[in-house]
Image (cartoon, helix red, strand yellow):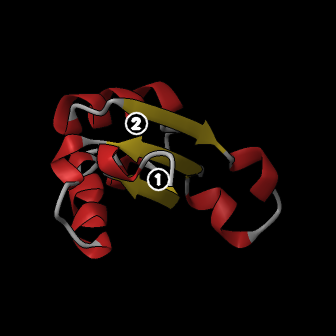
Amino acid sequence: MNPPRVHASAVEAALKDALEPVQLEVSDDSAAHAGHAGAREGSHFSVVVVSPLFEGKRLLERHRLVYDALRLLVPQGIHALAIQARAPSELGR
């Protein structure tokens, strides 16, 4: 039995609410993973998020903020998450 699908719109809404991003891109990459064992366990997403909340934080701290924002969605069917988390001051580098 397949788990319920988490949709990109739910990921986007959760990240917007928690991180107040100035830039946000959410891609559902699940179709590219069809056929591999984890594909049955849930959705695969890539996110690019630029938030003032990331200023002065290390990469691990930024990823923790992203995972915390998605804490209710992960058990609903997020299998994999690729994260690019930047502060606004890092844009254009």
> Where does the image place residue 90, in percent across and percent down from the top left?
38, 53
Residue contact between numbered discs 1 and 2, judged by CB atoms under 8 Å: yes
Residue located at (77% from left, 68% from top): 36
> Where does the image place residue 13, in percent across and percent down from the top left?
33, 26
User: In the image, 85: left or right of 52?
Assistant: right
Which residue is label 1 attached to? 78
Q: In this view, does 16 lie above or below 93?
A: above
Total count of labels: 2
Find the residue positioned furthest to the front: 93
User: In the image, 46: left or right of 72?
Assistant: right
Q: Which amino acid does label 2 sit on?
A: Val
Q: Is residue 8 visible?
A: yes
Q: What residue type is labelled 1?
A: Ile
Q: At numbered mark 2, what does the secondary structure look like: helix, strand or loop?
A: helix
- The foreground one among 37 and 82 is 82
- The foreground one among 39 and 67 is 67
Residue located at (56% from left, 49% from top): 45
The quadrant holding residue 16 is top left
- The foreground one among 49 and 79 is 49
Q: Is residue 53 above or below residue 33?
A: above
Residue located at (44% from left, 33% from top): 24
- Which circle marks residue 13 in the picture? none
User: In the image, 11: left or right of 20?
Assistant: right
